[in-house]
Image: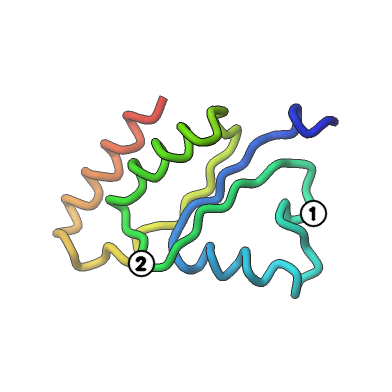
Amino acid sequence: MTDCSLPRVWIIGSSLIARLRAHLGAFGLDQNLGLDCQITWAGRGGRRWEHLMPLLRSKRADIRDDPDVMVIHLGGNSIGRHPPSLELAGSDRDYRIWP
């Protein structure tokens, strides 16, 4: 497979994702986790659920190719900021607007 035909994966989240990427070498892994894919990492401490859609729009504008797979680890920094029913409603709404 050539680089342009490799599956595209976005791994998005908070500090857990940022720390995972920073420590890949300790596990003997490269940025693509030793897989035949092209991974784009977007981890940053303090990221909350409401940061997801602006981040996805920005990534989409920068990269221009939608991912084949998206791994999202968010929500821990959002706990307690809104009632749980609003958090669930917001996440359901966000999933529906991503084409």
Name the image quarter holding residue 2.
top right
Q: Residue furthest bottom?
A: 26
Mark 1 secondary-structure assignment: loop
Image position of 82 (left or right of 32):
left
Residue 22, horizontal then vertical, whole percent: 63, 69
Q: Residue furthest right?
A: 1
Image position of 24 (left or right of 95):
right
- Spatial CA distance of label 2 from label 1 is 28 Å
Q: Residue at x 36, y 67 (%)?
A: 46
Mark 1 belongs to which amino acid?
A: Gly
Mark 1 closeness class: few <14, some 14–19, many ≥20 residues within 10 Å: few
Q: Earlier in the sequence, mark 2 or mark 1?
A: 1
Residue 44, horizontal then vertical, whole percent: 45, 62
Q: Nearer the viewer, residue 9 or 45?
A: 45
Q: Residue furthest front?
A: 62
Mark 2 secondary-structure assignment: loop
* Residue topped by disc 1: 34
Q: How many marks?
A: 2
Q: Nearer the viewer, residue 93 or 51?
A: 51
* Residue topped by disc 2: 46
Q: Residue furthest top?
A: 99
Q: Residue at x 23, y 44 (%)?
A: 90
Q: Which mark is residue 43?
A: none
Query: In the displayed structure, would residue 66 be above or below residue 88?
Result: above
Name the image quarter holding residue 77.
bottom left
